[in-house]
Image (cartoon, grey):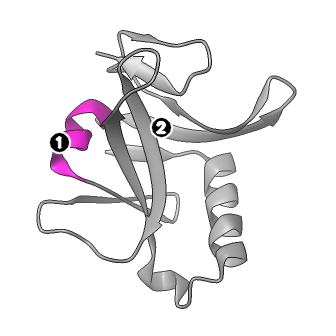
Amino acid sequence: MIYVSDKAREKVAKLLQEARVGDEAEYFLRVSVVGGGCSGLSYKLDFDNEPKPMDQVFEDNGIKVVTDLKSFLYLVNTTLDFSDGLNGKGFYFSNPNASRSCACGESFAV
């Protein structure tokens, strides 16, 4: 499962509305893990409306989250959150599978 905090849900809904992506009900949040960043792996977020055959689909807190099977292996029980505080603004992941992460919080290692 991939979880979505209340703050992340509010921000995702607002971004979907601002993007005016047509029928918002067809769009979902695609979460991926890609190579790169200080620690070796980075998170990637996109809006998408085309599921792929091996996608893993979850819904939490009213947000549909989709990830490919390979990325899901790194994201099991991860929570997507959003911060708008003084120490930085943006989405971040609380990933119990990460053995370390970089100072900026945008990359991790397992």
Residue that numbered label 2 is attached to: 79
| Above/below status of 28 relative to 46 | below
Element type at mark 1: helix
Q: Quadrant of residue 27?
A: bottom left
Q: Residue furthest left?
A: 53
Q: Check residue 70 for magenta coloring.
A: yes
Give the mark, 2 or 1, whose residue is nearer the N terminus: 1
Disc 2 residue type (three-letter) = Thr
Residue that numbered label 1 is attached to: 70
Give the side of residue 96 with respect to residue 8, left or right: left
Dot in front, 2 or 1:
1
Looking at the figure, which quarter contains the N terminus? top left
- At a point 62% along the width and 60% down the height, the residue shown is 12
Q: Position of residue 90 (x, y in %)?
A: 69, 40
Q: Nearer the viewer, residue 28 or 59?
A: 28
Element type at mark 2: strand
Give the side of residue 63 with respect to residue 78, left or right: right
What's the magenta region? Answer: 68-75
- At a point 56% along the width and 90% down the height, the residue shown is 22
Looking at the rendered structure, the number of numbered marks drawn on it comes to 2
